[in-house]
Amino acid sequence: MYALIVDDSRAMRHILRKIVEPLGFQIAEAGHGIEGFQRLAEHPEIELVLVDWNMPEMNGIDFVKAVRANPDYERIKLVMVTTETEPSKMARALMTGVDEFLMKPFTPEMLLSKLQLIGVSMPLMA
């Protein structure tokens, strides 16, 4: 099973990897949405994407729109992991097609709870 982490912060990608990798996921990483879309093409087995909102080149909302516009990716679960906390922005992300929204800062337990909520199968937790 593969997860993709799309965030322009190397530190945040590292934090997310440390939480998700022990669950049994192989991890691909990208520093912005365009690179994230390239990773999706390279790894068709990706089932989960953790994506930041604010990134250069292609932000998280545009990335989500592009993923949701491609029928090849309809099975992918998308979680927006961001500092954006305004209810209107959360609603926009959900309307754009994310399955869940996680605000930074967060705990590993908060992320795991969101993954369970959207039905992401976690092999080592089954």
Image (cartoon, helix red, strand yellow):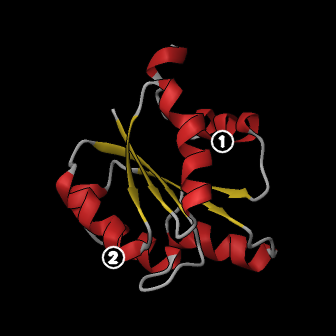
Residue 83 image offset from top left, x and y in percent: 74, 69
Residue 63 image offset from top left, x and y in percent: 41, 73
Sequence-earlier tag: 1 or 2? 2
Q: Amino acid at mark 1?
A: Lys
User: Few, some or many C-alpha atoms within 10 Å of disc 2 (few <14, some 14-19, many ≥20)?
Assistant: some
Q: Which mark is residue 36?
A: none
- Residue extending farthest to the bottom is 57
* Cα distance in 3D space between marks 1 and 2: 25 Å
**Pointer 2: what residue?**
34
**Of 75 and 60, the residue lying toward us:** 60
Residue 24 image offset from top left, x and y in percent: 43, 24
**Pointer 1: what residue?**
114
| Residue at image point 59% right, 73% down | 53
User: Few, some or many C-alpha atoms within 10 Å of disc 1 (few <14, some 14-19, many ≥20)?
Assistant: some
Disc tally is: 2
Name the side, left or right, on which 113 lies relative to 43. Answer: right
Label 1: state its secondary structure.
Answer: helix
Q: Is residue 107 above or below residue 39?
A: above
Q: Is residue 123 above or below residue 110?
A: above
User: Can residue 95 be spotted in the picture?
Assistant: yes
User: Can residue 119 be spotted in the picture?
Assistant: no
Q: Amino acid at mark 2?
A: Ile
**Of 84 and 97, the residue lying toward us:** 84
Name the side, left or right, on which 52 lies relative to 38. Answer: right
Label 2: state its secondary structure.
Answer: helix
| Residue at image point 75% right, 79% down | 88
- Residue extending farthest to the front is 11
Residue 116 image offset from top left, x and y in percent: 60, 32
Name the side, left or right, on which 80 lies relative to 85. Answer: left
